[in-house]
Image: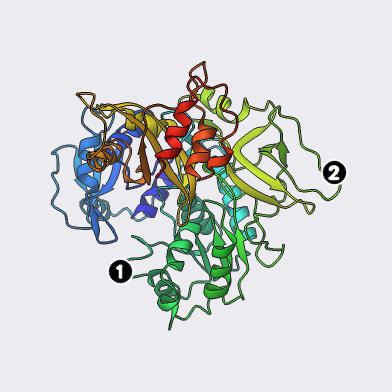
Amino acid sequence: ELAIAVLACARVGAIHSVVFGGFSAQSIADRLYDAQAEYIVTCDGAFRGAKDIPLKSVIDDALIGNRTVKKVIVCTRTRTPVSMIKGRDLWWEDEIKKVETMGLHDFPAEEMDAEDPLFILYTSGSTGKPKGVVHTCGGYMVYTNYTFVNVFQYQPGDIHFCTADIGWITGHSYIVYGPLSAGATTLLFEGVPTFPDASRFWDIVDKFKVNILYTAPTAIRSLMGYGLGPLQGKHLTSLKVLGTVGEPINEEAWHWYSEHVGKNNCPVVDTWWQTETGGTLISNMAGITPAVPSWATLPMPGLEMVLVDEKGEEIIQEGEETVSGNLCIKSPWPGILRTTYGDHERCRTNYFATYPGLYFTGDGALKDKNGFFRITGRVDDVLNVSGHRIGTAELENAINMHSGVVESAVVGYPHDIKGQGIYAYVIYQGSHGQDTHGTAEMIRKDLNQTITRIIGAIAKPDKIQFVSGLPKTRSGKIMRRILRKIAEGDLDNVGDISTLLDPTVVEEIKRGKI
């Protein structure tokens, strides 16, 4: 139904904005307000593992005080009891019947300009509120088709299984628009890869004779933890191409995926791209260009990728050396975002102002003698957790809304499963100025509830350390570099702390590291 709703919007010329089902009512309310949305399509609930997510009641909460939404169409899924507001809420099934009784079997497609907006998709930025990335009818369709067909070397008749959620760009581009524009059969699933057990993906591949499997390194690392048992007895011989997306893949996971899922017989495409790029920018092409574990390798033909230093000067390679720098793009491509909805200045400052004349990705990268790229991670204040982007400012704002919190700072650290984990340093002052001993776990639980309510469970920190102060410069800037080093366990290399307002706080934070 989600794919149907998305395609129906495209057909009538309406702009859609899909929201991941794990966000809080507050997060959804913010997006509804920003987009000035008029119609909502949702379900009574959704299944995620053994949990029933009450989507309709979350929407009801999100609509408190909303002035733009006219109708809410509710699809039956979990049969969770829901409240239906007369005049506003409608059942999907009733609306379908109405159309059928009217005898409408076809609806003419609205003629659109290539540059008309197709959809808005909200993504985390380095400043507080999420931004609505706008993609257009012409360029986005052209680019998702081009990348889908070439990266995966799609052949007519192939069955493509992308395990993403349509609430993220990967689902838009490689469950819906890319495969369907190429005439491919696309397969989507509901839930998580480990429920009812860790053979869920392999059962699907076996049952539907999947040819292309596209998933995230986090999922691969999680499934590795279950060993080879779940793969036993599963026929995976239909697989021709394996893909990874969302975050850099480590070598161990790459080899496990290639050897145990692909039987060393399937090229692995390691695709690097972003919500803002519409489709893959750097990747090997299945069976055509070489695959190198943990390297995204070559830019798509037509893409001008460059590395620049902090001043924006292009880094030129001398001989066979591998160089590192900030990853930028020199010229436009069809899938580039056109604006951030309702705030074009934010688009300009976020992507085009850091290095004038270049699109700045926010990622750092290495480039070797062959022109291959390896993505090293975000260089701005955005975390990549399980392939999901979370802005540190947005998360700190949520933590700071807790009544006992004075200030907080959030950084990423290496995580075995998620790629990057969330480490929060919190200055907590109880109502009577008590310290946090004995009640630390209760307060952590409380903070996590606050974060879940404001953003969603997706943003809960893996570690929360209570501190009496944060390392700040004399001008009041938090030195995140120091906090990152401590979170990573690299305690001997925190760097120069002489310029800090209070250098003693660093030793205290080191001692209290979790």
Identify the image quadrant of the C terminus: top left
Q: Which residue is mark 1?
A: 196
Scheme of colours in the image:
rainbow
Q: From this viewpoint, is residue 445 visible? A: yes
Identify the image quadrant of the N terminus: bottom left
Residue 424 lies left or right of residue 475; in this view the side is: left
291 relative to 360, above or below: below
Q: Which kind of residue does numbered mark 1 sit on? A: Pro
Which of the two residues, 258 or 30, is positioned nearer the viewer here? Answer: 258
Q: From this viewpoint, is residue 216 visible? A: no
Task: Find residue 370 and report its image quarter.
Answer: bottom right
User: Where does the image place residue 447, in percent across and percent down from the top left?
Assistant: 28, 37
User: Where does the image place residue 20, in percent across and percent down from the top left?
Assistant: 36, 46
- Residue under the image location 61 percent in, 61 percent down: 269
Q: Which kind of residue does numbered mark 2 sit on? A: Glu
Q: Residues within 10 Å of mark 1 (few under 14, many from 20)?
A: few
Question: Mark 2 or 1, which is nearer the eye?
Answer: 2
Residue at the outermost right position:
319
Residue at the outermost bottom position:
233
Q: Which residue is mark 2?
A: 318
Residue 454 lies left or right of residue 112; in this view the side is: left
203 relative to 361, above or below: below
Q: Residues within 10 Å of mark 2 (few under 14, many from 20)?
A: few
